[in-house]
Image: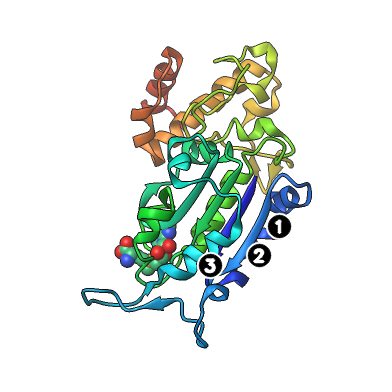
Amino acid sequence: MRVDILTIFPDFFRGPLDYGIIRRARETGLAEVSIHDLRNFTKDKHRTVDDRPFGGGEGMVLKPEPIFECLESLGGLAPRAERINGSAKQSVIVLSPQGARLDQALAAELSTLERIVLICGRYEGVDDRVSEHLADREVSIGDYVLSGGELGAAVILDTVVRLIPGAVGNEASTRQESFTEQLFAGEGARATPESGPSSTCVSGGLLDYPHYTRPADFRGMAVPEVLVNGNHEDIRRWRRKTALAKTLRNRPDLLERVTLTDEDRELLDEVRSPQAGI
Ligand code: SAM
């Protein structure tokens, strides 16, 4: 995948690009990431990227010219209509709190593309002609207002790149995570006890279950007994139950959206009972 990021603060990305999965994906060629300084596409001596809003009002707005010219300089981008109808596996995204909210499903969709351009706004935002005529979508990383799109671009980059096949060492781990609704091709809806506990807990759109590692007893805090007794079916059931409990506690809205099995409903009843102890 090729990713281009348009920003007035290119140095912002020094950290996010240089660690962990993103760094490895860049080194192995899975992701080629380029940062473009919008000030290089200005023509005045002050390298002006912003101007006052038409109609009056507070703040400044990012001008369209540097963004259009930067994008045109990249080469290889399909026309907007082809990006919108999906015939081109590309997307030009404006970061905006008014955009479609990023979630795991959108990240998975973006991870199938060959090319992504991320346009970072600042000040009061970006001249809307960029969204209307150049970009094909606006994306928000959550219902709050940041001072710039750079953090959002870093978030999209991270969540999308780690879903590219081969980016994460153990690919199964990205399939068992919180919010991951879909099973991947060739995987069964429910693993059997024989297949071992590690493959039994696709989250099915719930939050992930709790994880523990050694030592089994740390300062008197013991890991749950069920995890060390080696019974795969008990572990699978405990993981599902604790995932349901955590989702009920922290994100009950997710429970409205997922398809619960009979076993899930039984486990939820146990979780809700006063003796649950979870
Ligand atoms: N005037 C805008 C509004 O009220 O919707 C807020 C502009 S914000 C201060 C400046 C820039 O930060 C935006 O153009 C966008 O690029 C970025 N930004 C702020 N919040 C964001 C969010 N939740 N998701 C993605 N980008 C965001």
Would you call the spot at circle 1 few (<14 residues within 10 Å), some (14-19), or many (20 or more)?
few
Residues at marks 3 and 2 touching, judged by CB atoms closer than 8 Å: no
- The answer to whether residue 4 is left or right of residue 127 is right
Q: Amino acid at mark 2?
A: Gly
Place of residue 36 in the rendered image (x, y in percent of width and height, measured from the top left): 60, 66
Q: Residue at x 67, y 30 (%)?
A: 172
Q: Amino acid at mark 3?
A: Thr
Q: Which residue is mark 3?
A: 7
Q: Is residue 186 above or below residue 220?
A: above
Residue 274 visible in the shown view: no
Which quadrant is home to the N terminus?
Answer: top right
Place of residue 174 in the rendered image (x, y in percent of width and height, measured from the top left): 62, 35
Q: Which residue is mark 2?
A: 15
Q: Is residue 257 above or below residue 188?
A: below
- The answer to whether residue 19 is left or right of residue 79 is right
The residue lying toward the viewer, choosing from 47 and 194, is 47
- Label 3 and label 1: CA atoms lie apart by 20 Å
Place of residue 159 in the rendered image (x, y in percent of width and height, measured from the top left): 57, 46
Q: Which mark is residue 19?
A: 1
Residues at marks 2 and 1 touching, judged by CB atoms closer than 8 Å: yes
Point out the frontmost of discs 3 and 1: 3
Q: Amino acid at mark 1?
A: Tyr
Q: Residue at x 21, y 74 (%)?
A: 55
Q: Quadrant of ligand 1?
A: bottom left
How was the colour assigned to the protein in this rendering?
rainbow
Would you call the spot at circle 3 few (<14 residues within 10 Å), some (14-19), or many (20 or more)?
many
Q: Quadrant of residue 173?
A: top right
| Ligand 1 under 8 Å from disc 3 Cβ | no
